[in-house]
Amino acid sequence: MLVLPDPILSRPSEAVGAPGPAALALAGDLVDTMRASPACVGLAAPQIGVGLRAFVMDVSAHPKARSCHGLVVLFDPELLESSGPEVAREGCMSVPDLTGDVRRATRVVVSGTTPEGERRVLEADAFEARALLHEMDHLDGAVFLDRVTGPHAVFPRKVYR
């Protein structure tokens, strides 16, 4: 798992295009890494050193999730609609020691390509919408610290035992 200030995390990613064997292997690596990382609900390819527009997400076990599409694997995602901005706390595996307050939409519509090569459209709200936008930011070379509401909105991460 890459952490700041690794330069890959600050670079926009390249399109995957039509998924082939390499994209399927990447999807598997992302899912395996996400599931092996405690409290991780999403992971983008740049976080594991791959500069491609791909991410995985699963908010099924998160208490703040309302909409829930289960395991999501998307290549070349696009934001089609967003509304209802709200400020809430975020953390990130690539910024392991900090959290921050970030303004994001509470409802989104996102489309992308599945590993099977099909177009998938997701309508998400609340925490799932936030997670989708967070992962899509990684594909554009941004982390949540680039979106915090100000220097007063960055906090040391709590350690849970």
Image: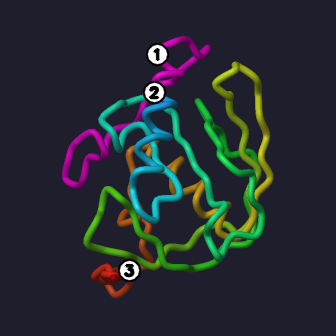
Q: Residues within 10 Å of mark 3 (few under 14, many from 20)?
A: few
Q: Position of residue 106 (x, y in %)?
A: 70, 69
Specify the principal SS of the magenta part.
loop
Q: Quadrant of residue 4?
A: bottom left
- Could you tell me if the residues under marks 2 and 1 are in contact, i.e. CB atoms within 8 Å? yes
The image's mark for residue 22 is 1
Q: From this view, report whether residue 133 is shown above or below residue 130.
A: above
The image's mark for residue 150 is 3
The residue singled out by tag 2 in the image is: 26
Q: Which residues are magenta?
A: 1-26
Q: Residues within 10 Å of mark 1 (few under 14, many from 20)?
A: few
Q: Position of residue 49 (x, y in %)?
A: 30, 35
Q: Residue furthest bottom?
A: 152
Closer mark to the observer between disc 2 and disc 3: 2
Q: Position of residue 6 (x, y in %)?
A: 20, 46
Position of the C terminus, as image quadrant, is bottom left
Name the amino acid type tagged 2. Leu
- Could you tell me if the residues under marks 3 and 1 are in contact, i.e. CB atoms within 8 Å? no
Q: Point out the tag, 2 or 3, that comes first from the N-terminus.
A: 2
Q: What kind of element bears circle 2? A: helix
Q: From this view, report whether residue 97 is shown above or below residue 34.
A: below
104 left or right of 120? Answer: left
Taking the spot 49% from the left edge, 73% from the top edge, the residue there is 102
Task: Name the residue nearer the viewer: 16 or 83.
Answer: 16
CA–CA distance in space, label 3 to label 1:
39 Å
